[in-house]
Image (cartoon, rainbow, N blue to C red):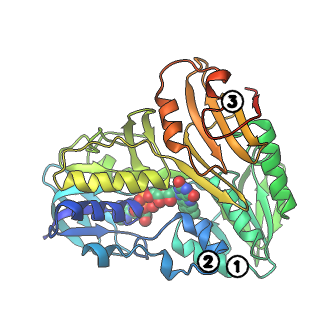
Amino acid sequence: MQTARYLIVGGGMVADAAARGIRERDSDGSIVIISNDVDEPYTRPALSKKLWTDPDFTEDDNYMNTSTDTGAMIHLGAQVTEVDAEAKTATTTVGSFEFEKLLFATGGQPKTIDLEAGDRVIFFRTFADYRRLAELAGRNLEIAVVGGGFIGTELAAALVQNTTRTTLVFPDDTLGASVFPPDLAESFHRLYADKGVNLVGGTKASGGRVDGDRVVLDCGDTTRTFDAVVIGLGIEPLTDVAEAAGLEVDDGILVDESLQTSRPGVYAAGDVASYPDRILGRQRVEHVDNAKSMGAVAGRIMAGSGETYTHTPYFYTNVFDFGYQAVGTLSSELRTIEDWQEPQTKGTVYYLGDDDRVQGVLLVNLGEGLDDARQILAEDWPHTRADLVGRLPSGDGSSEGNR
Ligand SMILES: Cc1cc2nc3c(=O)[nH]c(=O)nc-3n(C[C@H](O)[C@H](O)[C@H](O)COP(=O)(O)OP(=O)(O)OC[C@H]3O[C@@H](n4cnc5c(N)ncnc54)[C@H](O)[C@@H]3O)c2cc1C
């Protein structure tokens, strides 16, 4: 039996942040990270953005140097198969461990369609997926991206900017229609069309098959054929080991404000954790600000800090010259109030519930205002258009969106 004062299950961005958090309070306690990835922790957002668009940013730059900086022992290509939360032991493919504190940082696995993964079919999540897609890009191949959310839109932008004939297959009629008010969605859609992406809206790809060097994609009543297909449809949280260990799980692993699970000494953070957000209520967030902040807090708490997780995370995207940051819920099912400095290009969109409480704030190409946005979300009273317009640095010109 090997021993680890801190055992971290999973080797993504949370694992890196947690190891650093531990080291803020405990300079020499042993940290072991068991990761089924083949790469040491790396920055995941760069896999669909910076690595494609910044020629000065190399693959080497994308590693987080976790073991060098923290002394953590990282086992790559290894799997935690069982955790005994009472006995404080874990079974892994590289032997058994006794631990004092354990962190589930298992993230999630990509949602799939009925299509077998392979050289030309990529369910995009890892650095290895990036390397495979980068090999296919730039060869004038025709590649389909499935999914109109963050990952799909970012990958379509990345591919088309790298000499690839790119088709984006997505369920809404207008790209972004499920999260943006109509005018903003129209402008987002037009941006992709103008950049040369072939947009196939109103279409759910359900599966397909590989036929020689081509991939046949089932798109509703019809099929379409491409040189490769990359799928970005979000993730399912990886909760199986936690569930088998008897931890409370509901969509994600349930934690309290100290990031502790239903078992003492066992914690969870990042994409896999369902936590009580101070402002937004119980949430499971699949975004990097949450992964980094929650991971760091979990590390410090495991190393004895008495703090709680009070950060309400933001999320962001950058495609072409369009970028946004947001907090809370973005959904076109909510009523929106828009406050533009430059229409559809620079400004703020507020998302309100039936009770007129603000549930989400979208900051388009602003680069500031996140703290104000959190403050507005925390205000538990009905808001009017007059309250909101001009409150963030959006200048003049506002319009009320539709439900
Ligand atoms: C391409 C891409 C782009 C993104 N861009 C953005 C962005 O622009 N903005 C934003 O806010 N967020 C973005 N995100 C989301 C963000 O990267 C994630 O929220 C964050 O990386 C989650 O970190 P995590 O450590 O919780 O999970 P993960 O990064 O998923 O890491 C968990 C690791 O644990 C491993 N694991 C699971 N179970 C076991 C086990 N039993 N044994 C061993 N290992 C195990 C997993 O395989 C994985 O390697 C992006 C994600 C992707 C994929």
Is residue 286 something that shows in the picture? yes
Q: Position of residue 201 (x, y in %)?
A: 81, 49
Residue 4: image quadrant is bottom left
Q: Label 3: how many residues lie within 10 Å, few (<14), some (14-19) or many (20+)?
A: many
Residue contact between numbered discs 2 and 1, judged by CB atoms under 8 Å: yes
| 110 vs 43: above or below | above
Res 135 quadrant in image? bottom right
Question: Reading the chain from its start, which is encountered first: label 3 or label 2?
Answer: 2
Residue 332: % across, % down: 69, 34
The image quadrant where one finds the C terminus is top right
Depth check: give the residue in front, 259 or 360: 360
Mark nearest the camera among 3 and 2 is 3
Callout 2: few (<14), some (14-19), or many (20+) C-alpha neighbours within 10 Å? some
- Which SS class for mark 3? strand
User: Mark 3 — residue?
Assistant: 336
Element at label 1:
helix
Frontmost of labels 3 and 1 is: 3
Q: Nearer the viewer, residue 382 or 124?
A: 382
Horizontal side of residue 246 vs 367, given as left or right: left
Residue occupied by mark 2: 132
The residue depicted at 60 percent of the width and 70 percent of the height is 50
Side of 259 where 342 appears, left or right: right
- Tag 3: residue type? Thr
In this orientation, does residue 177 appear? no
Q: Disc 1 marks which amino acid?
A: Leu
**Looking at the image, which is closer to me, 270 or 366?**
366
Q: Residue at x 24, y 69 (%)?
A: 32
